[in-house]
Image (tube, rainbow, N blue to C red):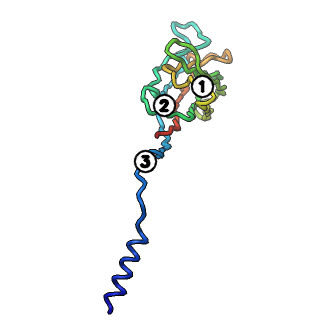
Amino acid sequence: MKKFPVLFLTIWFLSGCSSKLDWHQTEDFEAHPVLTMDLFHTEIRGDRFYPNGVPLTEIHDTIPFKAFKEKHVKDGLQKMVYYFHVKNELPASFKGTIEFLKGDNQVVSSFEAIIQPGTPQNPYAHEFRYTIIKNNTPEIVLTENLVVSFQRLDNNDISGAPGLLKVRSKGDFYVVIQ
């Protein structure tokens, strides 16, 4: 007699906890990772603007951009947030420019930031953010190089100035993987 309620409860429990499995759920699966990549960093002394004693108004460099070599990043990109952190210890102001270039060196996107003067004891520090939405700029995934440039905005002699212009950048890539 005691076995009947136990058997009944066991059957009721097992039947209530089972249902048909939907093996096609994996077709609807999406992952939304955010990938963070360090893109470049540099430290620039003031004398770099004076090669052989001749003042330059601008210095620049081209950096390979490998983030879109990864198929899942290129295909699944939703948006990219670009961080450009500067710490200026030099008594000079600059315009920093970042250009995203396709393989044929055409500019896909760019942004500029004004960097205020500072000193080693009181540096100017700021983090600039630039967001690129793939739907608004679909060619961004064709980026192969970054051109980073710093243009002088004043005539202060910084050839022997103590301190550095320190720049670090990274990107957060918001991706959908299906």
Q: Residue furthest right?
A: 154
Instruction: Point out the frontmost of discs 3 and 2.
Output: 3
**Which residue is the site of mark 1?**
90
The type of residue carrying mark 2 is Asp
**Which residue is the site of mark 2?**
75
The residue closer to the viewer here, 145 or 9, is: 9
Q: CA distance from mark 1 to mark 3?
A: 56 Å
The location of residue 174, given as percent across then percent down, is 53, 38
| Quadrant location, the N terminus | bottom left
Q: Secondary structure at mark 2?
A: helix
The residue closer to the viewer here, 52 or 167, is: 167
Q: Is residue 15 visible?
A: yes
Q: Report crowding for label 1: few under 14, some 14 to 19, many 20 or more residues within 10 A (C-alpha).
A: many
Q: Is residue 125 visible?
A: no
The residue closer to the viewer here, 152 or 120, is: 152
- At 40% from the left edge and 51% from the top edge, which residue is drawn? 23
The type of residue carrying mark 3 is Thr
The location of residue 163, given as percent across then percent down, is 54, 27
Q: CA distance from mark 3 to mark 2?
A: 19 Å
- At 58% from the left edge and 26% from the top edge, which residue is drawn? 138
**Which residue is the site of mark 3?**
26
Q: Secondary structure at mark 3?
A: helix
The location of residue 176, given as percent across then percent down, is 50, 39
